[in-house]
Image (cartoon, rainbow, N blue to C red):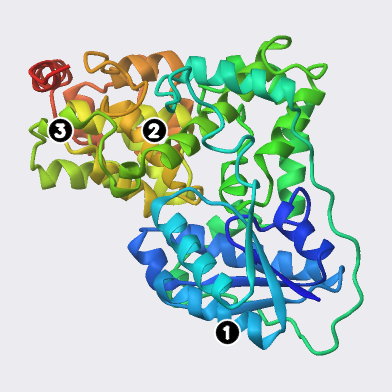
Amino acid sequence: MTSICWFRTDLRIADQPALYAAAASGSAIGLFIISEEQWASHQDAPVKVDFWLRALKSLSDELATLNIPLKLLTIQQWRDIPRALLSFAKQHGATSIHCNREYGLNERNRDRASYKLLKEHGIDLTGHLGATLLEPGTIKTGGDSYYRVFTPFARACRSALEARPYVLTPAPAKQVKLASVTTDPVPATLSYCEDVSQTIRQGWPATEAEAYKRLEHFSQEAIYHYQRDRDIPSLPGTSTLSPYLAAGLVSAGQCLYRAMSCNQGETGTGKPGVTTWITELLWREFYQHLLHGYPELSMHQPMRPQTNAVLWRDAPDDFAAWTKGETGVPLIDAAMRQLLHTGWMHNRLRMVVAMYLTKNMLIDWRRGEAFFMRHLIDGELAANNGGWQWSASTGADSAPYFRVFNPISQSERFDPKGAFIKHWLPELTSVSTKEIHDPLPLTRSAIGYPMQRVDLRSSRLRAIEAFSSLNP
């Protein structure tokens, strides 16, 4: 019996239910499908695709130690995947294919079509829980609807996890080598991502071992101060695991398991830093469940339909300045340059720059969402969409429309000495701590730093007016 593990965004050996099931049901073959046209239509960032390729090479090496070959198929569009899977399964005499479920609309349509065609030819396609802690659709309100408010959702998740603790899936055992199947070489790069800088590659080693290393390092000390340090962008106060979670080099279950081991097995009480980090894992879970429950989110529609009536500004010059880190607001510009240089942005700053674009500039959140997806090494539709809709006051449990972060106040609070700003805006290195958050006009002129694109006070009032006229 031959079985296939279809890898997607789960490029790991440990806690990999699909791989374990494939290996348990026969001689396993790994499969990954390269879909450059589909990735482009989903606006997946070149840095993310490059990360996948590097992770694939590492995965291939790890699978080889288990005598599991990894095969690659190049399929430009997902609509062609069902027939490609059928042909691949027949070629290798496989009677079953295993994968971990994904929850975007296109992903679910792809898998349904594949399941139907394969079943017609006597081949089973089995999905497993591998991307989330709990199966989307199992955590609902008393009215049998998906939670739209995070706090009761998180409470329900914690109760469910206490009743049915998450169990890590073991790695499969080494199998007898398949003489007739050889591993395909993983390309070092593709045209899609050939321009990714070595700086980014060196900053984000794409291996399962690196994911474990970061998780272990974080859980040794930083996790205990997470509630205090997570909002300070100049400190190494976060886990930096988001790219590894997005590519599946580490699972949410492994993160939860490690956090609970630091907290006497508790998820909601105990050490504040640990429980705060678990809450962040549950925010990720929340957005995955919403993506499953509300397919319109995959089509870039707001969770609150009435916000479609917001009269967003058509301001290409303002948007261009935002994308380049040239808004004249130091914290905003520093955050955007961090993104452009590293493929990653500190989570507190993601909220600040998103709210600045959608409220102060009054530019459609979908433009910012798309820009982030085209540049983030950790871009996930669920989390990215959820974060943007939260900031834009269009989503589930989002910030009230009248809540508009003042980026100057945020800067003074979370980067009081301007350490983060000066790192990413070297032109401001000589500016005093007193001025660093909002340099005076003479200072701006002397160092060539732009004036603010929009007035923060009047633009805030403009945003409030734009939203207040909507129906509740």
| Neighbour tally class for label 2: few under 14, some 14-19, many 20 plus, Cα within 10 Å | many
What kind of element bears circle 2?
A: helix
Please give the label number shown on residue 387: 2
Q: Amino acid at mark 1?
A: Ser
Q: Give the Cα distance between marks 2 and 3.
A: 24 Å
Asked if the residue at tag 3 contacts the one at tag 2, i.e. Cβ–Cβ closer than 8 Å, the answer is no
Camera-nearest label, 2 or 3: 2
Q: Earlier in the sequence, mark 1 or mark 2?
A: 1
Residue that mark 3 sits on: 453
SS type, badge 3? loop
For disc 1, the marked residue is 87
| Nearest to N terminus: mark 2 or mark 3 | 2
Residue at (33, 34) in percent of width and height: 388
Q: Amino acid at mark 3?
A: Arg
Q: Are discs 1 and 2 less than 8 Å apart at CB?
A: no
The residue depicted at 38 percent of the width and 72 percent of the height is 37
Marked residue nearer the N-terminal end (1 or 3): 1
Q: Nearer the viewer, mark 1 or mark 3?
A: 1
Residue 320 visible in this rendered orientation of the protein: yes
Marks 1 and 2, Cα distance to the nearest angstrom?
40 Å
